[in-house]
Amino acid sequence: MRRATRIALGALAVLVLAGAAGWASLDRETRGLLQALPTNRDILFWSVPQRDAAFRAMDRISLLAKWRTMHAGATPRELPAGEPLVLPIDVDAFMAGQRSANLLIVQGGKLRLERYGLGFDQHGRWTSFSVAKSFTSTLAGAAVKDGFIKSLDDKVSQYIPEMKGSAYDDVSVRQLLTMTSGVAWNEDYADPSSDVARFNNHQPEAGVDALVSYLRRLPRAAPAGERWNYSTGETNLVGVLINRATGRTLADYLEEKVWRPAGMQQDGTWLLSKSGQEISGCCIQAAARDYARFGQFILEGARAGGAAGTSILPDGWLQEATRKHADIDVPGRGYGYQWWTYDDGSYSARGIFGQGIFIDPQRQLVIVTNANWAGGARDPQALPAREEFYRTVQQAIDQEAARAAQPQQ
């Protein structure tokens, strides 16, 4: 009995030592996620500490999620430091109110502000949520230029035959991109019975993609093209369409068309649905500076190798993608091809909980924000505060330009 006890204690000691060694081998983000491991798979209802840990480590534990990797090239694009931008506000206070993980401002191709919070830094990856929609839009444009998508006026069912006979049978690719399909969808993040909360748990018919199975059951709420309704499900369907048209995984296509041409410094990842398809309406993980590189890439016309290179997109695509196609009932605002638009010509990619890329061509400006809003997915205080911050930066740049234009005394 004593010998058996000694053997058992010895085995336990080996397990403890092995566990300690394993724990020590994990990176900081993985350890943080394990310490605050979410108790359910629904991100919308995680606690603030759980989100703090998870948003920087969504691609660390394959039991929680699977992913594919976009590999960076050997020569990253430089983001040279510029003159620090002077703002008439307390930036630290703004970041505290946003619960910011990072705040970057690139103007004129130079990094003029870079700050981090929540224990995050330039080496980590933060999840994008719906900022990924604008990456997906860019892939749609690339697929048009490459000839995989013949026309934006083609019907969705030409590329996804399983949608024939559904409400999407009358919907064009363009209407899918602008979220004007007219198909019913509820995107209420606070409602556990909304479509955005339920479709991930949908049990599909055998042999049918889970998303396609869910969406083809939805009823029509308005004629196609007549009403805008925000739908992550439809962006996910855009991703399925690109996959079918190109025969490529989205991560592989993104690596070729964006990750390497934009000069990303670090690998990125894209989470997969349970069907093994990239969740194209969500969930790219990237470093803060690489989100800024994407913004600069778009600002310069999506040209490989910089502003003088060849665009991955058709002529005129970005002008169309980033102009107002749909009214969203917000003065001065609209929606393009998976981009939020402003009447002054600027536009943005936007994700829940404070993720965003704001691009202003007139001022050669890119602002990157990643955060974990305390007030939830669409924090009613943090969201307008961020919009005000964008305007503050624009005004500061205008004032700086006006001072520079004044004759020297």
Image: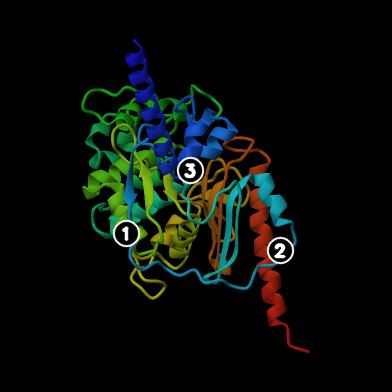
Amino acid carrying label 1: it is: Lys
The crowd level at tag 2 (other Cα within 10 Å; few <14, some 14-19, many 20+) is some
Task: Report the residue at 43% width, 25% height from top.
Answer: 198
Q: Which of marks 3 and 1 is nearer the N terminus?
A: 3
Q: Which residue appears farthest toward the right when viewing the image?
A: 409
Q: Which residue appears farthest toward the front when viewing the image?
A: 2
Task: Report the residue at 66% width, 62% height from top.
Answer: 393
Quadrant including the N terminus:
top left
Q: Distance between the residues labelled 3 and 2?
A: 32 Å
Residue of label 2? 87
The residue closer to the viewer here, 207 or 17, is: 17
Q: Distance between the residues labelled 3 and 1?
A: 29 Å
Rendered position, 131 above or below 73: above
Q: Which residue appears farthest toward the top when viewing the image?
A: 1
> Residue 263 at x, y = what percent?
39, 65
Rendered position, 345 above or below 83: above
What mark, if any, has residue 29 been given in the picture?
3
Residue of label 1? 257
